[in-house]
Image: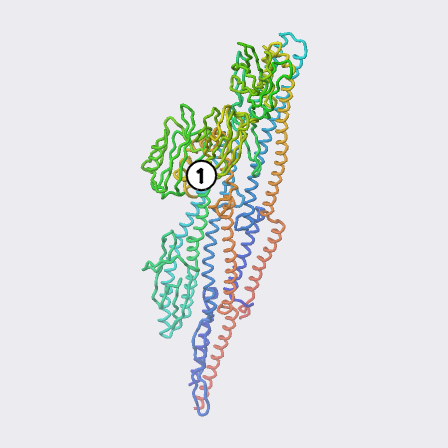
Amino acid sequence: MDSFSIGISGLEAAMAGLNVVGNNMANATTEGYHQQKIDFRPAYSTRVGDIILGRGVDVGEVARVIDNLLEQQILEQRYLFGQVSQELDTLRTAEAAFGGILAEGTLGTAIDAFFNSLQDLSSYPNEQIYQTQAVDAADVLANQFQTIANSLSSLENRVVLEASNTIAEVNILINQIGELNDKIRDLELRGGEASNLRDQRDQRIAELSALISVETVAREYGVVDVKANEVPVVTGSTVTQLKVSLRSGSLLGISVLDADNYSTQLEGGKLAGLFTLKNTLLKGVSSSLDTLATAIIQKINQYHVQGVGSDGSFSKLTGWSMSSADLDDFVPAVSDGDIYFRLTNQTTDVVSRESITISASDTLSDVATNITNNITGLTASVDSSNKLSIEATGYEFDFSPAVLSAPTASTLTGTSSPTLSGTYTGTDNDTFQFKVVGSGSVGNGTLKLEVRDNGGAGSLICTLDVGSGYEADYKLHVADGIYVSLSNGTLTDTETFDVKVFSSTDASGLLASVGLNTFFSGSGAASIAVCSDIVTTPGRIATSLGPEMMDNENVARMAGLKDELLSNLSNLTPGAFYRGIVAQLGQKITVREMKHGNIEFMTQNLKNRRDEVSGVDINEQAAQMMVFERLFQAMAKYMNVAQSYYDTLYGIL
Amino acid sequence: MAGTLEGIYDNLRFALQQHTEALAELQEQASTGSKVRRASDGPVAAYEILGLGSQVSSLQTYMDNSAEVISTLEISSGIISKMSSNLSTAEERMTQVVSGTYTDAHRRTAAGEIDEILEQVVLLANWQYSGRSLFGGTKTSTLPYKVQRTNGQISSVTYQGSLDGRDIEVAAGVEMPAFLVGDALFRSDDRSTPVFPESGGTGAKAGTGTSTVRGDVWLEVIYEDSNYKMRIDGGAYVTVDGTGNQAVTDLDGRILYVDSSAIDSTGKDLVRVPGTYDIFETLINMRDVLQDGDAEQLSQLQDKAAYAFDELKKLLARASVFAGTRMGSLGQLKDTVENLKYSAAEEAGRLQSADIAEVAMEMAQRQILYEMSLAVTAKLLSISLLDFIR
């Protein structure tokens, strides 16, 4: 009866083969499915006399056709692709916030328009139309900064939210992989065939690898252990879940769910893309934007505080609210130094200059007391929100560096009196000392004035001839924009007079720090705004530095910032720094686009190779189907022949 | 045909995605005409384009400023020409009066005409353009010349504008004055030694000190209490001490240094201080002499008026040349800036513009590839062993 056994084994083999072919064809388009192959082996043989006879065919196993090395390479490309895709999408959104190249209404055009408006104002510093235009341009600039800063901030928030959603997906996949491992091991321990389950599990691992970098280790009974970002998240059927959270410095961190051992470094997968975006890329763009805004605020304010607008000097100035009353805490930093006030007596029109000394360890109250006690006609106070106010009684005040017409010190005993004028263009505060050489009447003889810097202790700057040939009251240029004239009268040999000249009347930086006579308020891109005093009274734009308050010196130097290389902008102009931000962002996107294309191409190649190895070729399967069909027909025929053989044998018997 | 269904689908999807992305990019280029629309389209080109855009904007501001300065200088130049013309008329009138035989009535009529010219000159010096004073330097919002009148006539004209010109940036680092300083234009500032009458006068000569009086000054010498005494322009008398450098002060505190060693007679000397004439004071002085001067003053004026007019005409000619030169160089500068602007705009356009012919060719190429991808896939799927199984 072996013939029947052989026939039945052949029929069973053909049926099993057809089933495998059917399964393969049914999954021909199933993602992650690996072609299965049936393994036939000759059945155990028996010896009949000297002859060894076969006993048909045994069905060995149904196994997946898989190249594990290739699969690992595809996994690696998947998590790289996940990271780059996420970075690319988000950076493109960030780029959109900056607007198109040469489009109107971008931050770049707002920067140009602002500085151009200051240049226009420098042509007509006292005209309201140009003052209003400058305020409007500054307002647009501030709005552009705020809009981009808010967009980037919102983008960062979305990245954090996306990271939370992604980690939830990661945890779901980790659970599913653990459960499938369990099922595979159970089935294979019982001698079952778990190819389809393995495919399901491997598909989950592939999906996980798109979210986070994954390493797999194959174990017995088809179990695969998984490490995500070096953390063993699946060990057999045991799983470890992960969590993400914002850490110090607003950095995204990842940790095992039941521990607080955060890491801010991730490599590969969408989650790594989100980490890079939050912790490096977007933070970098936001930081650069803040740097630019801060530089413009500080530089404009640094100039602005010293100037005076067409509305003239002040009877009262109030700074902005400070979060601390300690000068040590201020940004921009306050250092030790003097502040010089220019005071105009409202009754006599006499202009004088007085100063206070600021120490970085002072409080605002110390400063207020210092002003009240030491500056005639001024009273200063600090309110509960740390706003410093200065109010004048019988005087008006400002911080103009304009040289005073009368000497700051004099030993002259003759009848001629000197008058100083001009705007100092030197870089350091100084004291010029004028020493009379010879005695006599101005315009006669060989009278001279020797001028030395550093209060007379410095080097000889120039010698001015005020004897014969000098017309009294004629202005003579001394140095660095300063002029002197002498009235008719007499001078005496060796007598002197001093003149203080200022490049800055606030060496401490306090005025710009507390918002006294500033143009911009705020400390970065998100908070920059035009000071409310300037908005409501554009005549407060500090256009002039000279004693007449009609010049354009201050607004011209503010407009000149457009072309100034600023140290806190890496020695670039504001415009160039802005262009750098945009171009660097574009560069990052371009690099990622290239990476994205390369990875996509490489992945496609690897998938093609995998298809060659593990894919289901319908024609190949159809050919196999025909083979198994023929096998089945052959074995059926064989059974018929065997039946006939036995029938004949029974007939003989 | 060989290939798995999944593989064929994947390859088709990949190819179509590549072609679609490329076609979308080409479509955007074709519809906008730009190949660089955002920084990521070409970071280096974008940096350049942004810089050039900023440069174009800045150069446009310079061009606007230049146009404004040229326009202002044109008006100023026209006014200076008009003043010069007025001065010539005044000179003609003076020449007619002092060289002919005129009655007092004629002289007073001539004085009236000079007064009219003075009014005109002051009006021109205070001219405003677009509400801005042209000759007040940085003080553009107020009239630069303040007039004081006595009996309805101008008795003094004081400059109250700024002594600093309003410089406007017309190119990077180049500033040009748009609003001129009247005090520098209409008053000489090249003082020379005062010129006393060489003969027939009081005998006074120029002292060694540097005087501060300006224009024409009347030095009056009298003899009183056995001493010669002298004064200028109604100031206090000082006793002649016979030294070589005696100061005589006028009512405004201005000094004339006189060598009084040779004073030997009384009278009025018209002392001329070359290089210090003021157009207003000169006209006021001439009008007053024509109106109220005595025969001696008229006689001296006949000799000296020509010097004064000559200096003032030179002064206005210099102002006119100054304005004309500025306009000329500004015009050239504006052309240069305009060329730079167009060059920058052209370069930005070159960097930014898409080559439409190239785009069209690439689009056609991509379209063919797109169709081929579909056709090949259809072909792959159309032939199968299944078709032969019966």
Q: Position of residue A386 (x, y in %)?
A: 34, 38
Give the quadrant of residue B383: bottom right
Which of the 4 quarters of the picture holds residue A43? bottom left
A336 shown above or below A471: below
Q: Is residue B154 visible?
A: no
- Quadrant occupied by the N terminus of chain B: bottom right
Q: Please tell me which residue lies in front, B15 or A237.
A: A237
Q: Residues within 10 Å of mark 1 (few under 14, many from 20)?
A: many
Q: Secondary structure at mark 1?
A: helix
From the viewer's side, name the closer residue of A643 and A132. A132
In this view, the residue farthest toward the bottom is: A49
Image coords of residue A509 (percent x, y) = 41, 40
Chain letter of the residue beneath label 1 in the structure image: A
- In the image, taking residue A527 as reference, residue B257 lies left or right, namely right
Please state the horizontal and vertical placement of residue A38, each as a whole percent of the image: 45, 74
Give how far across and how far down residue B121 sits, in percent.
59, 19
Depth check: give the residue in front, A87 or A536: A536
Residue that carries the numbered disc 1 in the rendered image: A302
In the image, what residue type sits under mark 1? Gln
Count of picture labels: 1
Vertical placement of residue A574 versus B105, above or below: below
Quadrant of residue A193 in the image? bottom left
